[in-house]
Image (cartoon, rainbow, N blue to C red):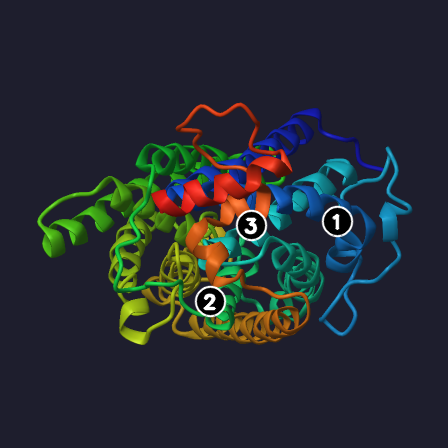
Amino acid sequence: MPELSAGDTAWVLTSAALVLLMTPGLAFFYGGMVRAKAVLNMLMMSFLALAIVPVLWVLWGYTLAFDGTNGGLIGGLGKFGLDGVGLDSMHPGGLPIPEFSFVAFQAVFAIITVALISGAIAERASFRGWALFVPLWLTLVYLPVANWVWGGGWIFELGALDFAGGTVVHINAGAAGLALALVLGKRIGWPQQPMRPHNLPFVLLGAGLLWFGWFGFNAGSALGANGLASAAFVNTMVATAAAVLGWLLVDVVKQKHSTTLGAASGAIAGLVAITPACAYVSPIGAIIIGVVAGAVCALCVGLKYRFGYDDSLDVVAVHLVGGVVGTLMIGLLASADFTGEAEGLFYGGGVDLLWRQAVAAAVVIVFSFVVAYVLGKIIDATVGFRVSEEEEVDGIDLNSHLETGYELTSTSAGPTRSAAAAPARAESAQGA
């Protein structure tokens, strides 16, 4: 049996911790973009994913994603409850790291993927509906797609490339977000009423935490402390920076100003786009991907107004579009110096890799959208997936959690006491 590498193991565990930090970062990023009366609910939707997904990952998530593949579609149940994964178990692919470290690393990917969807339905989704959607979508969509791409399934066999989650994470979550936005419908007053971010410092803090944690996301996907991780790190850094510039350029052309929200959103767009490509392109290729993603995602924000779907926090424009940009640009910019074999169109490889990337992206979009839409409809028809009009207007924080994000008046009773709930609702409605 090969000897475990202490350095590789330490890097994978460190990367897992960095990726775990991304979910609280996402909570702040999303939380700052909603109105003040919905900030706690937005934070809680991410934290609920942090609570539900790890438990399910240990029970059946890991085994269905990574215990081989059945027909290229789903894993087996041989490691249900992590049965057979011991202290001496090696990575299933033979890498010199413990299998437990791989379990942990993949678990945090699943957490943030689910949490990403919440931004599309901010300010109007019932917490009980979200609590039901999380385990169902994880089981029926995320686990099969993870098996297709990383568990030896049909996308892996097709030869499409996705180093750290362009299809599994971002396209997957973006398509589901679009489906739920259509199921829940528009927020009251959208788009006539302005619904501006209530706390841009939160947004920038969240974007910074995401950028920091994303080095674990991308460089950690090398599953070792090696040259591949180093290249992914550099590509992640420069693509993100270039995307900020790309988004701000669109801001300046369209609005004559560079905005803080644009800078934060550009950073996330660059991180999303470079995720599938970070180990397959040169740093120059990474810069190109970043600039293109920043500009294209900025332009796509307006699609929701043109087509009339209320994607509250632009999950579609940033994650779905950014994921597609990064996935397809592998087919243009992949270099054999990094992939070891596959080459993109611009490096003499023709369209062979490009069509494989396109097929992978298209199938994940359709699969995730359809299943999420059906799940959303079922949940809405049973437990309810949208809060009432009164709850939405008064403030989803107070009605869902009996708390408010900002205590602006002094009261004798705490906000969590039921006796305080009625006057607190009235006070919130006056300030809404």
Count residues near mark 1 (Cα–Cα under 10 Å), then give few for <14, some for 14-19, many for 20+. Answer: many
Label whose residue precedes the other's in the sequence (1 or 2): 1
Q: CA gap, disc 1 to disc 2?
A: 26 Å
| Residue annotated with mark 1 | 57
In x, y percent, where is residue 200? 31, 37
| Residue annotated with mark 3 | 115
Q: Is residue 97 above or below residue 188?
A: above
Count residues near mark 3 (Cα–Cα under 10 Å), then give few for <14, some for 14-19, many for 20+. Answer: many
**Residue 205 lies in what quarter of the image?**
top left
Q: SS for tag 1?
A: helix
Q: Tell me the kind of residue under disc 2.
A: Ala
Q: Tell me the kind of residue under disc 1.
A: Trp
Is residue 283 at least partly visible in the picture?
Answer: no
Q: SS for tag 2?
A: helix
Q: Is residue 427 left or right of residue 195?
A: right
Q: SS for tag 3?
A: helix
- Which residue occupies 83% across, 62% down? 76
Q: CA gap, disc 2 to disc 3?
A: 15 Å
* Figure label count: 3
In x, y percent, where is residue 89? 84, 39
